[in-house]
Amino acid sequence: MGYVLGLGGPYHHDSSACLADDTGTILAFVEEERFTRRKHNKDSRSCAQSAAYCLAKAGIRLEDVGEIVVAWNPGWPEQADHITDRELIRELLAPGYFNGYTPRSLTIVDHHLAHAASAFYLSGFADSAVLVADGSGDGVSTTVYHGTAAGLKVLRQYPFTQSLGWFYETVAEHLGLGDWTSSGKLMGLAAYGQPRHELKFLRTSHDDGYLLDLSRYGLPAVDETANYTNFTYYNRLKRAYASAFTDLGVPAHHRPATYDLATGRMIADSGFTPAQADLAASAQHALERCLLQLARGALTQTRSTRLCVAGGVGLNCSANGVLRRHSGAKALFVPPAPGDAGCAIGAALECLRRAGRLSVPYAPMVTTALGPAFADDQIRETLDRTQIPYSYHGDGIVDPIAHALAAGSIVGWFQGPTEAGPRALGHRSILADPRTIATRDRINRDIKRREMWRPLAPSILAEAAEKLIAEPGPADFMVISYPATDHARATIPATVHVDGSMRPQIVQEATNPRYARLLGAFEAETGVPALLNTSFNHEAEPVVCTPTDALRTFFATELDALALGGFLVTKSDGRRSGP
């Protein structure tokens, strides 16, 4: 069979590529946004640059790939196994990146099946209930699967008219938090409110499922298949939700923005009212209630003790924490890229399973660092070309960085391969001292340039997890929330949210040795075995990928220092030093 190239996110956002060989090994995975520098690669289907990277890493051409598989059926609701439309293929894989070559055919894997595969196969489980929930993909919004050695079997499915993802994003838009790309803000805001509203239009059902019924607000339950691709239904849905939320006494909020003379930027109002926070809390509670009902039913039906979660709703760390604590599952896995980008992995792995090249249980994913990497010689070339002063420390870079962090500096940390997924895990991170909330506030205000009420997360040395995380469990990818211990609230308050929760990353030396050494060096300086860790970007850009990206963001923000591989860059005058 040879190589398999998986493509994800062709719905005009979150496109990506994953290359695997015929042993089932993932060789490369990266999102297109890392190259285009357009967040979510919004309004584009192109996977060309991410695919070109994957091929370059393996040293092959597109013609050498045995099968190209995409997590999307452009002809839905008509069933199809392949895409043969040459113009559509060229939209996904622009031939200019592949010496003019255009594949004749792409294999289709159902969108939700790709989501499920990205969770189940990467979990390492031999058997699991799998819950997929998102906005919509190939006409489907929620699916329950049973994952076994035979693959993934559909147990239950909900159409796009029952979308939990669209429900959640519409609440965020109603409260003025932004479009669908900003839905995650609602999760942070929910902690400031109380779930005072019952939201009767979204309720659990007696058959271990849920029912979304907006007929009272002008959206009757009829066949809407014909209105899916032209967005007619989607627009009517939003109007119905607006009426429902207004009926609750929470009118639509349009956040004003003003031009700031000092920064030259438009600054949006980031405040909120108690009523807005209560609607956020009510939406979060309703989502969690529906997911719990689905998860419990799935575990009962499959007789499994394990649960996997994927789809865009899988980015909701708070809901994942509720599932971990209350679903009855003894083990929970959420992949690092549960949204559409992760479908590239799922599509590739499902293709390999069908070909008999992937066995279950598959090796569990332990790192997301599968993208471009830059050796110190390459970084030095960039620094010299741009005439930026630096000092070189090699593997000893952890010591000056730990000292700077302990002294209150906020540092860009750029090490090794680019990570996949929306959360940085010690390769493309902004790091700070977690002992004071003033640090969190400075990052939100001056560096991330976002709402002051949004939480930030900790990276914690593995041996210290029990002191800081109540009932610690899997925490490799910052996708599951946990209650903080009293010790954590006292020692790392900058990473504990207002509701006492946090979204930790437990750092293992075996998978990220330099980052683990940095945490150890910071502990030696301060007695605290944790750092505040957020993604290396500001509000208008994706996570940095290259040394040039890192330098641009460093000088465009209020970061104090930058660790580029073994190089230290600061904003004070100085000369190059080191070998």
Image (cartoon, helix red, strand yellow):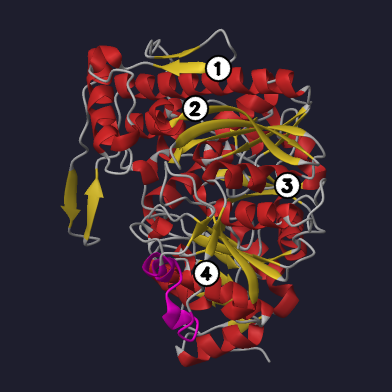
* Residue 436 occupies quadrant: top right
Graded by Cα atoms within 10 Å as few (under 14), some (14 to 19) or many (20 or more), the crowding at tag 1 reads some
Residue 573 position, x and y percent, is 46, 82
- Residue 157 as seen in the image, left or right of residue 185: right
| Residue 428 higher or lower than 457, as above or below | below
State how far apart marks 2 and 1 are (Cα): 10 Å
Residue 361 position, x and y percent, is 82, 46
Report the residue marked by disc 2: 158
Give, as a three-letter code, the residue at label 2.
Tyr
Tell me the element at label 1: loop
Q: Earlier in the sequence, mark 2 or mark 4?
A: 4
Q: Earlier in the sequence, mark 1 or mark 4?
A: 4
Q: Main secondary structure of the magenta part?
A: helix
The mark lying in front, picked from 2 and 1, is 2
Give, as a three-letter code, the residue at label 4.
Ser
State how far apart marks 3 and 4 are (Cα): 22 Å
Can you tell which mark lies on residue 50? 4
Report the residue marked by disc 1: 209
**Can residue 457 be seen from the camera position used here?**
yes
Report the residue marked by disc 3: 121
Q: Residue at x 76, y 39 (%)?
A: 465
| Residue 413 higher or lower than 190, as above or below | below
State how far apart marks 1 and 4 are (Cα): 38 Å
Query: Which quarter of the rendering shows the N terminus?
Result: bottom right
Toward the top, the furthest residue is 206
Tell me the element at label 4: helix
Callouts 2 and 1 close, C-beta under 8 Å: yes
| Residue 339 higher or lower than 525, as above or below | above
Graded by Cα atoms within 10 Å as few (under 14), some (14 to 19) or many (20 or more), the crowding at tag 3 reads many
Callouts 3 and 4 close, C-beta under 8 Å: no
